[in-house]
Amino acid sequence: MSIEVIGNPKNPKCNKTHLDIEKANERGLAHRDYLAHSLRWTHVLKHVKKDDMNILDVGCGNAMLAQVLYVNKRGNCNYTGVEIRKTMLDIADKRKLKKEPRLIQMDITKDKMPVDDGWADIVTCFEVAEHIPPEDLDFMLKDINRCVKSNGVVLLSTPNYDGKHQAANHLKEYTEDELSNHLRQYFSITKKYGTFASQKDIEVILSQSERELWEKLKEYYDSNMFSVLFAPLYPSQSRNILWVLKKKVNRGSIGDTTSIKDDVWEIDV
């Protein structure tokens, strides 16, 4: 397999650190960050209704999602992964999968992704927004909108900034309202899930029945598991949110009969 290269993928402004989930076992336990990654991928599987769907993985890292699709009997999906780091794609290139993924090294903040308009049934963009310059966020979102089908789904996750604590390796973390304003320019927000949360932020807002379950499970599970167990129910209180999005379509776009009543715009990429 050859790794395609688009433009000049050497943006010095992007933060290129990552969490290597394949090293999770070195700790001897399931840390909440690893759990959150794994559960995001299991959520992708819930959207894969057919084995031949087109999946675009934006900021794919070492294409672990392609591996997840393969081992969970979705190996015939047409997977395209785009990533700025050649080192990550070299790892992805060594995966032994049923169907070779298409791997592209590029800067998603400067160049259009090399897929046709409306190609993707599913677009994933997990833990990427916080690593790119904030002034480039809208370029990426516009192009994701271009790539996804009108009846497709976009799954985007990023930290939910609480106004106090931002990871040192993140260029910008967005508050829930701040990111919502960006997303609503290009997508309809159909659902939000927390992916992990601090126990202190969740425990105080549990219903009586949830609290009873909380206490029973606490006898067995550690804090890492608790950070992901109840987070999906309370995205606003979570440290990280997964947004489930549907495409907004501008009036008069070729091949699409869907229109929107407001926020009419053209993709200027």
Image: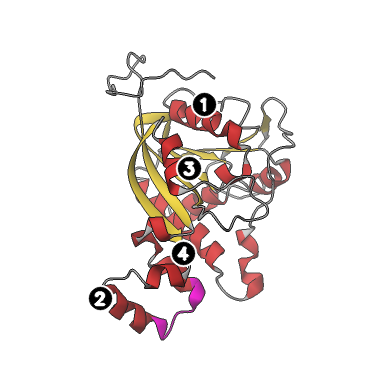
* Residue 266 in picture, x, y percent from top left: 43, 17
Sequence order check, earlier mark of 1 and 3:
1
The kind of residue on which mark 4 rests is: Ala
Task: Specify which label sits upstream in the sequence, 4 or 1.
Answer: 1
Give the amino acid at mark 1: Val
Q: Which residues are magenta?
A: 218-224
185 left or right, relative to 67: left
Q: Is residue 74 visible?
A: no
Amino acid beneath label 3 = Thr
* Residue at 53%, 67% in the rendered image: 32
SS for callout 3: strand
Density class for disc 4 (Cα within 10 Å; few <14, some 14-19, many ≥20) is many
Please give the residue where the numbered disc 3 appears in the rendered image.
124
- Observer-nearest residue: 212 or 70? 212
The mark that comes first in sequence, 4 or 2, is 4
Image quarter of the N terminus: top right
* Contact flag, marks 4 and 1 (Cβ < 8 Å): no
Separation of residues labelled 2 and 3 (CA atoms): 35 Å
> What residue type is disc 2 on?
Gln
Single out the residue that lies furthest toward the front: 163
On the question of residue 184 being in view, the answer is: yes
Q: Is 62 left, or right, of 13 in this rendering?
A: left
User: Disc 4 marks which residue?
Assistant: 197
Q: Which mark is residue 115?
A: 1
